[in-house]
Amino acid sequence: MQEHRQKEEDMTIKEKVQDALDKVRPSLQADGGDVQLVDVEDSGLVKVRLTGACGGCPMSQMTLKMGIERILKENVPEVTSVESV
């Protein structure tokens, strides 16, 4: 347990965000979409690109805010907001 905690502490914010996105990715891929990490700013703003079916979906903003942003904030407290670019 201590080793796992130390590993998380050694990860950068960008690595933590990528790890959290990897948890969300299977549900997006099940619907024919995906998410790519574009950037993580010092302010905690995470920029992602929704691809595949998610890229043109009218519900993509809801997926972004209610799904991806919520999961990222739960897993990476430094995240303040997520936006699609």
Image (cartoon, rainbow, N blue to C red):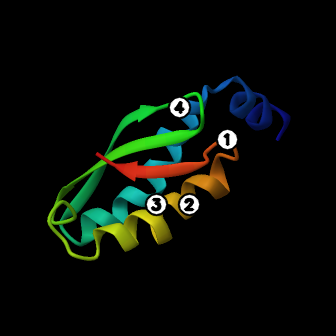
Q: Which mark sits nearer the N-terminus, 3 or 4?
A: 4
Q: Which dot marks residue 15?
A: 4
**CA distance for labels 3 and 4:** 16 Å
Q: Nearer the viewer, mark 1 or mark 2?
A: 1
Amino acid type for the residue under numbered disc 4: Glu
Q: Nearer the viewer, mark 1 or mark 4?
A: 1
Under circle 2, the secondary element is helix
Amino acid type for the residue under numbered disc 2: Ile
**CA distance for labels 1 and 2:** 12 Å
What is the residue that sits farthest to the right in this orientation? 2
Q: Are marks 1 and 2 in contact (CB under 8 Å)?
A: no
**Neighbourhood count class around disc 1 (C-alpha, 10 Å): few under 14, some 14–19, many 20 upward:** some
What is the quadrant of the N terminus in the image?
Answer: top right
Q: Which mark sits nearer the N-terminus, 1 or 2?
A: 2
Under circle 1, the secondary element is loop
Q: Which mark sits nearer the N-terminus, 2 or 4?
A: 4
Q: Which mark sits nearer the N-terminus, 3 or 1?
A: 3
**Neighbourhood count class around disc 3 (C-alpha, 10 Å): few under 14, some 14–19, many 20 upward:** many
Q: Position of residue 30 (x, y in %)?
A: 26, 70
> Which of 34 and 43 lies nearest the eye of the viewer?
43
- In the figure, residue 25 lies in which quadrant? bottom left
- In the figure, residue 58 lies in which quadrant? bottom left
